Amino acid sequence: VRSNPQLHCGLSTETDVSFLFKVLSINKTLSIQAHPDKKRAERLHAANPSAYKDPNHKPEMAIALSDDFEAMCGFRSLQDIASSAQKHPEFVTMIGVENAKRLIKTASSSHTPEQSRDMLQTMYHHYMSLPDEIISVHLQSLLGRLNSLGYIVDSTDELVLRLSHQHPGDSGIFSPYFFNHMKLREGDAFFIGANEPHAYISGEILECMACSDNVVRAGLTPKLKDIPTLVEMLTYKTGQPDVTTGISLDKFTKLYHPPVPDFAIEVMDIPPSQVYNMGKVNAPSVILCLNGSGVVEQGIVKSINIGFGVAAFVSANTEAKLYSGESGVRIARAMTNVHL
């Protein structure tokens, strides 16, 4: 690509592929994390290049490939967090007794977004700054009660118990009391912008993101947790991100395009024994076969047999025909976002 960026990238300002494209099969909850915005990434990289390895941002999008995809993303409402505090004294200790009193008062009355943000940041800072010994004592107390005979748990408590089995003793086990628990079905997708806390819990997804390795972790991990950076950078917005099922480009293709220039994703479901013109785009792309089989043909230049797991790089402005096999074929194509 770098040997001839004009040929492969097309866009005059691009000299490399602007995205990372992955398939994740999640059996164990991944770490709670957030990714810095562009300006913050530049500062973090300059100050600590060993921990923050590049100066780029890392917005991402997840598209469910199964009906059991679960994630945590964004803060719950103050009312929901207050309800958890009233139910669990251990969680009160996590956020601070005085903070909990203020939370319940604020949640029960009208409040501005600024007041909500200040409340969330104060509580989350208190929680993330607690010594491991204190967290451990109260975590054991909480889990003992949730596991006690006859205790009725709600869905948030159930997630806490799941995390306790997957990540024993980790402070992040309290996270479901802070963050929204999302359940998505195949074809559902959501965008995660900069500075938003999130964690993938289970299921299979396509994940596409800007090219970066910058991660600020918050829990469910033994890796470095940069607490001052994390507490300062989060947006502290409440509510779940918008879920989309994509936009139909034609009867076979759906487009998922986030509000960033780095990437977009097309998912093509081609019935058996069809010929489909895969239109050219003025950007590099990567195609991945999700199931079925077929042939991708670039005129007389190149022909590739495709099946489950086969991937290929497609240079900018490349026209290709897709010949689906007897069982049809499903292909995902990630590209620089030419749809903005």
Image: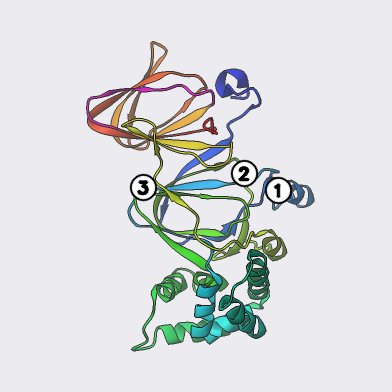
Q: Quadrant of the N terminus?
A: top right
Q: Are marks 1 and 2 in contact (CB under 8 Å)?
A: yes
Number of the label disc, if any, that sits on residue 137: none
Distance in Å between CA atoms under marks 1 and 2: 9 Å
Q: Is residue 169 visible?
A: no
Q: Secondary structure at mark 3?
A: loop
Q: Nearer the viewer, residue 116 or 35?
A: 116
Residue 127 lies, with reference to residue 324, above or below; the image says below
Q: In the current view of this chain or complex, which residue is farthest to the bottom?
A: 149
Residue designated by label 1: 41
Per the rendered image, the range of residues in magenta is: 270-283
Q: Nearer the viewer, residue 234 or 15?
A: 234
Magenta: main secondary structure: loop
Number of the label disc, if any, that sits on residue 212: 2
Residue 235 lies, with reference to residue 50, above or below; the image says below
Q: Nearer the viewer, mark 1 or mark 2?
A: 1
Residue designated by label 3: 65
Residue, x 54% and y 81% (percent of image)? 85
Distance in Å between CA atoms under marks 3 and 1: 30 Å
Residue 89 lies, with reference to residue 128, above or below; the image says below
Distance in Å between CA atoms under marks 3 and 2: 24 Å
Q: Position of residue 124 (x, y in %)?
A: 63, 71
Q: Earlier in the sequence, mark 3 or mark 2?
A: 3
Q: In the current view of this chain or complex, which residue is farthest to the front?
A: 110
Mark 2 surroundings within 10 Å by alpha-carbon count, few (fewer than 14), some (14 through 19), many (20 or more): some
